[in-house]
Amino acid sequence: MHTIRVDSKHGESVEYIGYGGSLSCINWEANLKVGRVYPNKIALLKTISLAAIGGHFRFRTVQSGKRRFCVRCWQVPCPWKLRAYKVGLHEFKVVKYDPLHECDLRFVSSHHPQATAELVSDCVKWRFQDSRSIYTAADIKTDVKKKFGVSISYSTAWRSRELAFKTMRGSAEESYSILPSYCYELERTNPGTLTYIQTDAADHFLYFFMSIGACIRGFKSSMRPVIAVDATHLKCKYKGVLFVATAFDGNRNIYPVAFGIGDLETDAAWEWFLRKLHCAIGDCSNLVVISDRNVSIQHGLRRVFPGASHGICFYHLKGNMKASFHLKQRDPILGYFIRAAKSYRLAEFNRHFSMINNERVRTYLLRAGVQKWSRAHCDGRRYNVMTTNIVESINSVLRFARMLPVLHLIDEITNLLLTWFSQRRDLAMKCHSTLCPDLGEQKLRKRLDAASRMNVVKINDVEYNVLDGDLNSLVYLANRSCTCRKFDLEQLPCKHAIAVCRHLNLNPYSFASSYYTRATWAAAYAESIYPVPPKGTWVIPEHLNNVKILPPVCKVMPGRRKMQRLPSKGEDSRQKKCSRCGVKGHYRNTCKQSVPLKN
């Protein structure tokens, strides 16, 4: 055995002991020394394990009791050992420590027994503070190899990820048990908030509903009476579906109204959610509800909102039509259908619909209800909202939050609404135009250019004929109506109405609906949404502390949960294409093709 002293690049001297033709580092770990006190035995063991992994040696436990703890190097000839005693209620103090190593490096392996899932999870748990962070088991394997120089199995990495996730977010079972207390605090910090929890006879979770008070009041006072509803699947342990009801504000932004959680998209679940939504918004006149062709939604609307008009998302209807009749993406029938659905005039609709030469497709569309998907036949005022894309956008925003336990999902939704309200309130305060900049103002400015080239002929004091080539229109300015029907359905002056306003020197802004004004937009976000305080500060009534909710009754399947969204019926799945080599089937970050260097 011989000793070698080497000066490192930082100017420090490190002593090595040669043994059997190999080298072993000594005095490299400063956290272990005599006299140091650790809060408990687990913290001491964690420190020793990290030291062993970093020093590429193993240790074994010689003695582990309530008052003493002793470990030594795995190779018997090596003198390295540590002894600690209990000095307080839980604290352990190092009383003897020999840092010298004389172990043979021929027995060093890339797999370290002290690199357990518990230890790795404690080192990587900080990465799960943000719900949007993607940190996979493969990433954990790579980081452990780079940081500690040891290899762990994929199963160890996966278990460490699950433990870290549970440490930061809690268990799914605990999430359901404290849900009533969380709802109490949410209602206390945000007055007017409505939350409902439905359980079965055995106290197992069934349904949940939440609508923030500021969103309820903002919808009633400032939103167009058009609500899009849809559901998306959760990816947590007990799965389920997330129900969403949302509106459009005057600036083309998503305005969430209510959220719910259920087991499946059944008649009972949708009716329960819609009844709670009715409790939140009340009887809304001229209400239009837009959804896909889910039969459960239609049944629930018929029972809960009998006076509301039901519209179908024409994008979903197009997907169903493609799948049912095996139509290709560029089939002319799809183009005629889209033009017919977006037509404002009945004559325009009839022209495009007659171009669909497939009788089975025509029968399918007629049975779906023309008044539900055609803008020209709509029996309610849809305000140009033809799809449920606003709900799909929320589902996309919450794609990471849907992997969390139910309590943290609700908390993420609350924080998301808090951020949106704050940002849009600032935008509304900085806006100086009469109408909202991204919807009303842009549309009127685009229509102004076309209106400036039109001639106006007065018929009487309230009716004017606007000459627009072959599509002349009759404008009823007092009724805010035009035969092109854009003025009627959107409640924004069409180009013909703007031409009349120019002819009469009238302000076109005065004929726009109040839903598009900046003042209404600012009023929708005037109130603030507050986050739920930390759990340690909650003051919960005694009757709620005794309420315990059990997880839903469902079969938890083993294995990895699906994270990728399944395409809807008739939806075209986009094929990956590498921007590096141009080959389809993969992306740039996974490209392994050899690409010639450019001169």
Image (cartoon, rainbow, N blue to C red):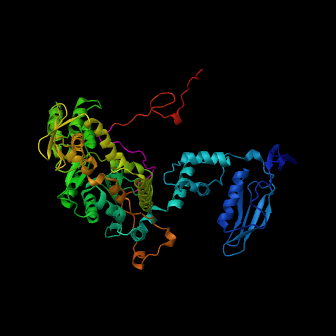
**Membership of 114 in magenta stretch:** no
Residue at the spot 40% in from the left edge and 75% down from the top edge:
544
- Observer-nearest residue: 539 or 179? 539
**Membership of 561 in magenta stretch:** yes
Residue at the spot 83% in from the left edge and 48% down from the top edge:
11
**Could you say where residue 364 lies in the image, as x and y percent from the top left?**
17, 40
Q: In the image, is residue 539 above or below residue 578?
A: below
- Observer-nearest residue: 2 or 422? 422
Q: Residue furthest left?
A: 460
| Residue bounds of the magenta highlight | 556-571
Q: Quadrant of residue 247?
A: bottom left
Q: Quadrant of residue 574?
A: top left
The answer to whether residue 384 is visible is yes
Residue at the spot 17% in from the left edge and 58% down from the top edge:
307
**Could you say where residue 230 lies in the image, as x and y percent from the top left?**
30, 52
Please give left or right for residue 599 compared with residue 100 in the image. Answer: left
Q: Quarter holding the C terminus? A: top right
- Observer-nearest residue: 121 or 490? 490
Q: Residue furthest front?
A: 505
The answer to whether residue 153 is visible is no
Q: Residue furthest right?
A: 2
Please give left or right for residue 134 compared with residue 12 in the image. Answer: left
**Could you say where residue 231 lies in the image, as x and y percent from the top left?**
32, 52
- Observer-nearest residue: 464 or 161? 464
Residue at the spot 53% in from the left edge and 56% down from the top edge:
129
Q: Main secondary structure of the magenta part?
A: loop
Please give left or right for residue 525 compared with residue 44 in the image. Answer: left
Please give left or right for residue 517 compared with residue 20 in the image. Answer: left
**Could you say where residue 437 lies in the image, as x and y percent from the top left?**
36, 47
